[in-house]
Amino acid sequence: MKLLSAAIFLYSIAILSSWTVLGSSDFNVLDYGAIGNGKTDDSKAFLKAWNDVCGATEESPTLHVPDGKTYLLNPLKFQGPCKSKQVIFYLGGTLMAPTKDEWISDGKGQWIQFFDIEGLNLQGGGRFDGQGSLWWKDCDHKHCKRPTALFFHNCNGLQMKGMKHINSAKNHISINMCHDVIFSHLHISAPEDSPNTDGIDISESTNIFIEDSFMATGDDCIAINNGSSNININGITCGPGHGISIGSLGKDGEYNVVENVHVSNCLLRSTQNGIRIKTWEGGYGYAKNITFEKITMKNAKNPIIIDQYYSSYAYSRKMKGMDIKVSDVTYREVNGTSANEDAITFNCSQARCSNIILDNVNIKMTNPGEKAKAVCQNADGKVLSAVPPVSCLSKSH
């Protein structure tokens, strides 16, 4: 695991050192008819500019969105592949989604999509505004289909730095089937009571590095889902929200896997959960080789939790050993305060969580007059040092 983390870290430093300010060929959306008054639909102008950017043969062509303006964009897709090895999307102004009442009813599940683009580099101090308030108000979050704001599919070598993202109707950023990705210095926010407004969702992706970012949402700050591996998260401030989660895995009886995850140097404040692994009954697969270290939590409701009964599948598999297997999970230098007395929870299935290691873990109650405790079932591993004590795991001497 240490070798993996070092490799990802060195890879990230190499990529971050290559941030480009603007490409040699600049395509300004204003030259393609964009107005930027926040009222006129600028979608066609953006797509025209994108077609020229994507078709350019010069090195690092740039789609340039000037600052000082607000660009109203209806749902649109930036489609690759492009001719240049690196394409820059420079956002200086604000991109604004239509409100729910103005949304085009054509079944789109995303607001802005990027598909099949190698070397996509999003940069600048601009902002994405999902205008999600009417969606949150008018929809039952369990049954209402709402759009994800930014969706990246098959965008290898993706980089995104220094942008703000507010008030998505659903997930702020989702990546799917992307490899060698770096997100850095992002600011993502939505009200605490906004449903399902995850910060960053990852699925079927590898070699993902997320660093030095702030996330305050109504759901997971970061969610690591099926098919993801070699995920490195460092320097995240999270809260409010539901914390940093692996899963949920195994929904609807599916086979799901996640492995090689390293979360470090993070601060979680007043989150519903801290660092969490969540799986469904009836699913099968595994989550393994996971390390949480140098994590500080302040007033988290469930600071450390593995929940293998997150939800049930109605036609649950009854085959023995066909659960999600959780193994090789290390908590090192994890400290802070808990809003609930159950500061550490290992609620594992009959397949058992194995090789759970607690090393220098210290979580106390937010209220000094109360005492934190640990609860667990079906868990194996060892404790090097932990407060509160975790009696179900063996002590190392």
Image (tube, rainbow, N blue to C red):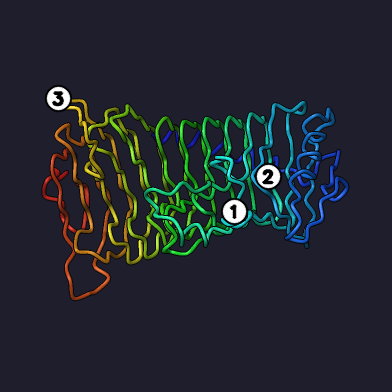
Q: Which label belongs to residue 320?
A: 3
Q: CA distance from mark 1 to mark 3?
A: 45 Å
Residue 248 in view: yes
Placement of 97 over or under 205, stated as above or below: below
Horizontal side of 380 relative to 363 (left or right) equals left
- Point out the residue furthest to the bottom here: 369
The amino acid type of the residue labelled 2 equals Leu
> Could you tell me the amino acid type at mark 3?
Lys
Residue at the spot of label 1: 185
Are there few (<14), some (14-19), or many (20+) residues within 10 Å of tag 3?
few
Residue placed furthest toward the top: 319
The reply to whether residue 164 is in sight is no
Residue type indicated by callout 1: His
The residue wearing badge 2 is 122
Residue in the picture at 68% in, 54% down: 95
Q: Residue placed at 38% from the left, 48% from the top?
A: 143
Proximity of marks 1 and 2: CB atoms separated by less than 8 Å = no
Indicate the quadrant containing the N terminus: top left, top right, bottom left or bottom right: top left
Which numbered disc flags the more N-terminal residue, 1 or 2? 2
Q: Is residue 325 left or right of residue 184?
A: left
User: Position of 203 compared to 164: left or right?
Assistant: left
| Quadrant position of the C terminus in the picture | top left
Q: Residues within 10 Å of mark 1 (few under 14, many from 20)?
A: some
Mark drawn on residue 351: none
Q: Secondary structure at mark 3?
A: loop
Q: CA distance from mark 1 to mark 2?
A: 12 Å
Mark 2 or 3 closer to N-term?
A: 2
Among numbered discs 1 and 3, the one appearing first in the sequence: 1
Q: Position of residue 267 (x, y in %)?
A: 42, 59
